[in-house]
Image (cartoon, helix red, strand yellow):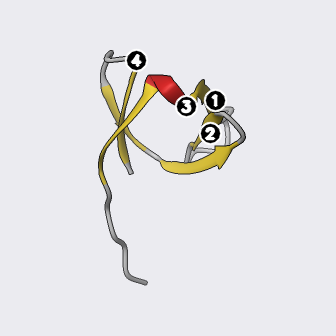
Amino acid sequence: MIVSINGFGVTCKKIFREDRKIRLKLINEKYNNLVYPAPGVRFLSMIETHS
């Protein structure tokens, strides 16, 4: 999913909805996942992958 966080920049991450929050899962496991309040996350586009 491509998302904008509070209008500052855009990122492409796997997303998980948790209560009133959105967790963005990073592919590089050296870094922690990012968690934001749902109202601050704007979904811009979905990316489909095929294995």
User: Closer to the N terminus: mark 4 or mark 1?
Assistant: 4
User: Closer to the N terminus: mark 2 or mark 4?
Assistant: 4
Q: For mark 1, give the secondary structure.
A: strand
> Is there a contact, CB below 8 Å, between mark 1 and mark 2?
yes
Residue 38: mark in rendering: 3
- Left or right: 26 in relation to 48: right
Name the residue nearer the viewer: 25 or 17: 17
- Left or right: 2 in relation to 31: left
Residue matched to label 4:
6
Instruction: Report how far apart the C-alphas of labels 1 and 3 lie in the structure.
Output: 9 Å
Q: Which amino acid type is marked by label 3?
A: Ala
Residue matched to label 2:
23
Give the answer, above or below, for where 39 lies relative to 7: below
Give the answer, above or below, for where 51 lies relative to 10: below
Instruction: Report how far apart the C-alphas of labels 3 and 4 lie in the structure.
Output: 10 Å
Name the residue: 50% across, 26% down: 39
Q: For mark 2, give the secondary structure.
A: strand
Q: Which amino acid type is marked by label 4?
A: Asn
